[in-house]
Amino acid sequence: MLSLTVHAILAVVVVLVTLRANPTIFRRPDSGPMFSPMELALYGVAVASVVGGWTFNIRFVTENTDGWLTNPLWGDGSWAQYMDLMFDNAAASSASIDFIIANVVLLPLIAIADGRRRGINKPWLYFVVTLFASFTAGWAFYAATVERQRRLGARVPVEAAVSS
């Protein structure tokens, strides 16, 4: 359980570092609501993903270990056992390899390339979020960031609108 606690703390830290790295995107809007309905939906998906996934992660660790201080790298309840079970049968292997490729290749490629084009600082942090929170949470956080950036950039200052 200690390893899960550390994972949870690291997830929060990475999200906070991402927010601090992008103050212009995550600033309070000049007008309108703090979050758009789309941002709220995406953050809701992220939270649901973390709650759902972590429910099973906690169950996996508690069912396969006998205490807080267990080896998170190998043995019962470890990362190695978790990975073995991901490939326990052909159906699990199919879903697992798809998930791994999407998480380790696709998300970083899109988040880094697209994030740089959009001026998002440290876009690789969205991949790091997936390592500690969940794959879906990392994607949803990135999509919410893009939505927020779009929404904030779409506002035309009153002075500019008047002079046009």
Image (spheres, helix red, strand yellow):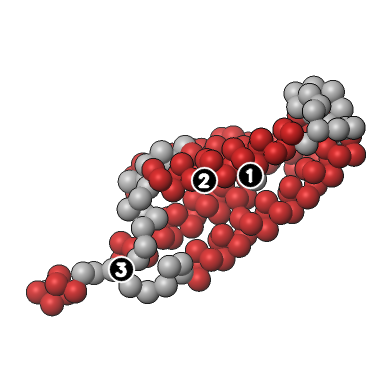
For badge 2, the amino acid type reads Val
Residue 127 at x, y percent in the picture: 54, 39
Looking at the rendering, in which quadrant would you find the N terminus?
top right
Report the quarter where the C terminus lies. Answer: bottom left
Q: Is residue 15 above or below residue 97?
A: below
Q: Earlier in the sequence, mark 2 or mark 1?
A: 2
Q: Is residue 76 visible?
A: yes
Residue shown at 87% from the left, 27% from the top: 76
* 156, 104: nearer the viewer: 156
Q: Amino acid at mark 1?
A: Ala
Residues tagged 2 and 1 counted as in contact (Cβ below 8 A): yes
Q: Which residue is mark 3?
A: 30
The Cα atoms of the two marked residues, 2 and 1, are separated by 9 Å
Secondary structure at numbered mark 1? loop
User: What type is the residue that disc 3 sits on?
Assistant: Asp
Distance in Å between CA atoms under marks 3 and 1: 31 Å
Closer to the N terminus: mark 3 or mark 1? 3
Residue at 49% x, 55% y is: 143
Q: Which residue is disc 1 drawn over?
A: 133
Residue found farthest to the bottom: 162
Distance from label 2 to label 3 (Cα)?
A: 23 Å
Residue 63 is situated, as x and y percent measured from the top left of the image, at 90, 39
> How packed is label 2: few (under 14 Cα within 10 Å), some, or many (20 or more)?
some
Within 10 Å of the Cα at label 1, are there few (<14), some (14-19), or many (20+) other Cα atoms?
A: many
